[in-house]
Image (cartoon, grey):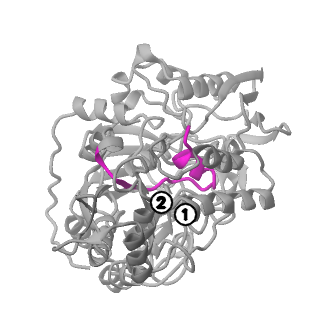
Amino acid sequence: MSDLRSALENAQRPRRRWRWAAAAVAVVLIAGIGIAIARSGGSSEAAGSGAPVRGGTLQFALIDYQRSPDPQWGTNYAESLIGNNITDKLTWQDPDTGEITPWLAQSWEYNADLTEFTFHLRRDVTFSDGSPFDAEVVKANFDQYVHGDPALGILPNGASLLRGYRETRVVDPYTVTISFDRPLASFLQATSFTANAQPGFLSLSTLKLSAEQRTDATKVIGTGPFVYESWEPQVKTVLARRAGYHWSPPALHHDGEAYLDKVVFNTIPEASVRTGSLVSGTVDATLDVGTTDEKPLADQGFQIIHRGVSGTAIYFAFNSSLFPTNDIAVRKAIQLGWDRQAIEKTILTPSYSVAKSILEPSVPGYADYSGSVLRYDPEQAKRLLDQAGWVPGADGIREKDGKKLTVKLLGINNLVVNKPAYESVQQDLREIGIDLQLTVVPIPDYTAQQAKAKTDWNITAANRSRNDPAALNLQFGPSAGNSTYLSADSTGVNVDELAQVLGKLETTLDPATRTAYAKEAQDILLEKYALVNPVYNPSQVIAHAPYVHGIVFDAQSRNHFVDAWKNPGN
């Protein structure tokens, strides 16, 4: 994925700063937990009064920008959010329960060993160019999504999500069977996946286009409730309502077309300008609300809605092959050596929470480790380092064999809490003799540096959006993401054992068994080998004007606008 990101970044012109004539406003939050909590304590959908009204344009602000209109490629939040509104998925995942429910597929079944999944498609779905959505289109999409097309410059964007993909077989015009060369229990959830490099369906005409040709947004054709009107790289994307759309997920209880005429996604990198633009009325809603802006905005009457990002917490993945994080004593000391309560009190708002596991609490199989390895115990951390031969130096930073206990971290600044949270950890670790050096940069710079992470960085700080415990295998499995760079140099880690434990998550859909396997996976990552240090649970926080209603958060906390509407005259 990083190579494709770099290719597109190099192809685009330098980033332009967004200029809004709006006052900066200093602003922190209200309490509330749930799928989408508003200032009044109710959901976003219920925040308005009266029946939905058709028409109008929603001006929506984002910290990031869409680097390509191709939804199967896009990996940042702006790209997945926009892609979800021009494409649909086979299934919809209930954000409260995690249940997989119908969408473009009306029903499905699978074999006992979870290597074949058969889907029965709706017969009334079309792409916005009028072409039919059928079994042949599903096959063409999955084949290209997993295998890519070198001649077109299309990379295998879905290969990591659909590991072991064998083929999609057309059973009849509206039935497909998708098969794998190994059990893949998480595939059913993957058919609803709305985050990084999502499997949103594109028309056959779009699949024939090269990566370069897909930068003409009007040629990127989906089945979704909106269509591309225009794309101005690094500035804004405009979506227009799709005429004739009538196949929203049944779980949304939305009949017919989207209510809004248009949604305009504006890139506004500066938090104060996003807030000022909302207050001035230049935009109607903004994502990426600064933590210090939540409460002042709520006090002014703006609605604050949020949902925790299902998947993993924001975590430090330790490079287990690189000195000094190849020492388990160092990894365990970092887990114990920082004050979670301080971050909760001084940095987080009630929209967020301190991590108590590597999984986010909404993910099935989540377990709480706050009473064991994920507690603040600086004295125990010091003892671990003492026993491992790390001696305090003249400046307070520990040393061993003439080498300083310097730990280099690479992180992304795409979430407003990231850098201040890392800085708090940095201060606490210095007190126990660990020099945590931070490099927190925009996604393009992070991607470029990540290519050298195995040799240059002790920690990569990230998260994985996916409302399924198999996110752990996807991210940390030795033959999958291998975020901790397991190798023969990973002192004291049984790589085969880790692979076996994480791999169990793909072998069953029985809820009780899967919960037990998820607990084993968390145990081995957090307790036995201390390969990760979860920091906080991220959240997507939106502030919107009181005349805006119906913004939906899905199970990956991406937003859908098919049900969104505005009061007349706004």
Q: Position of residue 220 (x, y in %)?
A: 43, 30
Give left or right: position of 253 versus 441: right
- Left or right: residue 427 versus residue 84 is left
Image location of residue 477, percent across then percent down: 56, 45
Label number found at residue 526: 1
Queried whether the magenta region covers residue 464, the answer comes back as yes
Q: Amino acid at mark 1?
A: Leu
Separation of residues labelled 1 and 2 (CA atoms): 6 Å
Q: Secondary structure at mark 1?
A: helix
Q: Is residue 261 above or below residue 53?
A: above
Q: Earlier in the sequence, mark 1 or mark 2?
A: 1
Q: Amino acid at mark 2?
A: Val
Tag shown at residue 26: none
Image point (16%, 67%), residue name = 22
* Image quarter hosting the C terminus: bottom left
Between residue 328 and residue 253, name the one nearer to us: 328
Q: Which residue lies under the disc numbered 2? A: 532
Find out whether the residues at labels 1 and 2 contact each other: C-beta distance under 8 Å: yes
- In magenta, the rendered stretch is 456-479
Question: Camera-side residue: 558 or 313?
Answer: 313
Residue 34 seen in the current view: yes
Q: Is residue 451 above or below residue 273?
A: above
Q: Tell me the element at label 2.
A: strand
Residue 437 is covered by the magenta coloring = no
